[in-house]
Amino acid sequence: MEQLTKLEKFRILAEVGCKSKSTIDNYERYIKEFTRMYGEHPPQERIIDYLHYLKTEKKYSNSSLNMAKFALKFYYEEVLQEQVTEKIPHIPRPKSVPKPV
């Protein structure tokens, strides 16, 4: 079997892990941007830098930040086979106000 690229390996592992097509596509988008900015195997500290960039420069919502966080966690743990030890802060979901009936 030929050598797979990290993105090909990611897709296979995500499909085997029963991720939905939209989740896989979103994860792949974050992983591509992250590796384009920092290389294929950057130090884990770059995860925080990337999330900060998404929040401050691109003005991403907390939901999008969480998606990026889980995409990178999957990339490190499943593709790179490296346990994420960098402390990544909890990103709260925005509180929704109930609609009156």
Image (cartoon, helix red, strand yellow):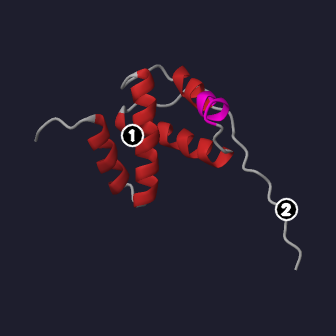
Q: Amino acid at mark 2?
A: Val
Which comes before the other along the chain, label 1 or label 2? 1
Number of marks drawn = 2
Dividing the picture into quadrants, the one containing residue 78 is top left
Q: What residue appears at the point 53 percent right and 22 percent down from the top-left corner? A: 46
Q: Compared to 36, does 78 lie above or below?
A: below
Residue 19 at least partly seen: no
Q: What residue appears at the point 51 percent right and 23 percent down from the top-left corner? A: 44
Q: Amino acid at mark 1?
A: Glu
- Between 65 and 10, the one lying in front of the other is 65
The spot of residue 61 in percent (x, y) is 66, 45
Q: How far apart are labels 1 and 2 at the CA level? A: 37 Å
Q: Inspect the magenta stretch and tell me whether residue 56 lies in it.
A: yes
Check the image and name the residue furthest to the bottom: 101
Q: Compared to 94, does 43 lie above or below?
A: above
Residue where numbered disc 2 is placed: 97
Q: Is residue 5 left or right of residue 68?
A: left
Mark 2 lies on a secondary structure that is loop
Front label number (1 vs 2): 2
Q: What residue appears at the point 55 percent right and 28 percent down from the top-left corner? A: 50
- Pointer 2 local density, CA inside 10 Å: few below 14, some 14–19, many at least 20: few
Residue where numbered disc 1 is placed: 78
Magenta stretch, residue numbers: 52-58
Q: Is residue 24 left or right of residue 60?
A: left
Dividing the picture into quadrants, the one containing residue 90 is top right
Q: What residue appears at the point 68 percent right and 33 percent down from the top-left corner? A: 89
Q: Inspect the magenta stretch and tell me whether residue 57 lies in it.
A: yes
